[in-house]
Image (spheres, coloured by chain):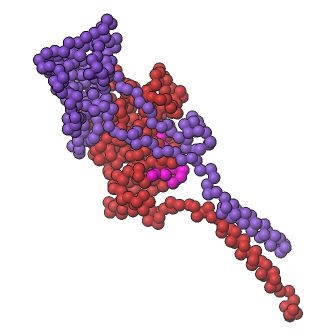
Chain colours: A purple, B red
Amino acid sequence: MNSPTRTPQTLVVLGVVFAGLALNFLLGSPNPSAPPRIPLVDTNFLDTSTVRRSYADLARAKEDLSDFDCYVCHEKGKAPTLRFDTNQNLIIPKEHADVVMGHGSHGRNNNCFNCHNETNLEFLQSRDGRQLKFSDSPQLCGSCHGPTYRDWEAGVHGRITGYWKRDLGEFQRKQCVNCHNPHSPRFPGRPPAPGPHPLHWNGTEAGESPAHPHS
Amino acid sequence: MNTSDPQPTMDRRSFLRTSAVLTTGLAALAASLKPLLEIKDLPTMEQFLQKYYKELTPAEMAKVLNRIADEVEKEYGLRPHVRDLKPMDGVEYVYCLNLTRCIGCRKCVHACVAENNQSRNPEIQYIRVLRLPHGSLDIEKAEHNYHPESVPEKGFFYMPVQCQQCKNPPCVKVCPVHATWQEKDGITVIDYDWCIGCRYCEAACPYWARRFNFTKPGIPKERLNPEMSYLGNRPRRQGVMEKCHFCIQRTRAGRYPACLEVCPAGARKFGNILDPNSEVSYILKNKRVFIQLKEEMGTSPRFFYYFDV
């Protein structure tokens, strides 16, 4: 500001700059580069319930157990006859159409009475001859799957919910049939939850995130 | 004109002109500073003057928790239950993850977000599920953007990665203000009121486990988890780091973490390694625990990956 004529000129220039900025901020859109909204995740993916419900769950919740009343249809004291096709595959009667025989490979485990008690259908029959209630099914599974049963007992195979510190609260060990269908035990596939969205929005479609800065 | 004052410094006209220009200019200056008004989430004086976490007396801590509850109530219209849970004696947490069982469904990712009040928009997630081709453990071949109809996919396995709660944590070493440290139960925690947001820890972490709040976290009111803890899942401010803390608000109350509870395949196991009867002790003794991720970094994670035999 050496020359007195320069001062007003500088002030005018600065004033114009500020006025321009002010106009820009007042009239312009508040945040032009805002990324699109990421939809909230479906609450089904937050559900902690098991894949299936066991007999024990249904009994505890006092729900309909009529599926387990075998002698509404079957005759007491008389073993049902099993029929097989020419390939030695079990022919499933239409009353049991929901049963998919898929336990063990090569169709070798195709006899209902490998696990169900032949003379009392409301019980299970383990390989070592014990009669077991439907609610005690893990012992039946354990009579063939020993190492897995040992892991399950230790809480290492399968699901546990509740308290890791047992003296502070209850914990629940889920049964084999909470995850595995006993007739077809392979764990079913399921649709995955939505993948990550890019943190820095760069115009790509959701799901095509740019490379991670560290990679 | 008064001749006794031959050179007046300013006549009336130029005074008016100058002051008009000055007024307009100042008004324009004020208006051009409008973006400053958009800075929200400034700390209150009480928060600004708050002492370091480890120096707070129980009475002062109660005050702080009350302040946090007030702030959350004002912001989200819901009174939370904020606690400051201390580590238990004789407890050191270990996490084990069964790579044979994980199906890559990402339910753990979203259960974690819901439990820990992470920002939904922009998205912050503590768990990253990597998909790897069978026969390799090369992280370079991993992909986290997989979108099949159904998981698991043939020929792949899945490896969720989150904070490994290292015994020798590089993130803690680089923090210039001691806003992050390792507690005696093995959890590395962050004091969100002490963090200055320099992101050194994010750069130091070999597991990409730390996340930065570039904006104020966007949490929908109806999805806020009101069961909170100071070092855990209370809502964060803009400009601070966060990461997995083994669900400190659950695990220090004796419960399992949220990611474990939601896992449909039972692939996640958690517990006290100092208890010889815990699940994690059984796994480390009996299972093929083959990997601590990036073992060669010398970080000694408390997070173990294993296979079923």
Residue plotted at (27% across, 21% down) = A96
Q: Is residue B204 above or below residue A23?
A: above
Taking B300 as reference, is B174 left or right? right
Taking A155 as reference, is B162 left or right? right
Give, as a single range, the part of the protein colored magenta. B206-220
- Magenta stretch, main secondary structure, is loop
Q: Quadrant of residue A163?
A: top left
Residue plotted at (83% across, 86% down) = B8
Q: Quadrant of the N terminus of chain B?
A: bottom right
Residue plotted at (78% across, 82% down) = B15
On the image, the x and y values in percent for residue B215 come to: 53, 52
Q: Quadrant of the C terminus of chain B?
A: top left
The front one of B96 and A180 is: A180
Whether residue A82 is visible, yes or no, is: yes
On the image, the x and y values in percent for residue B154 come to: 46, 22
The front one of B211 and A179 is: A179
Q: Is residue B158 above or below residue A74?
A: below
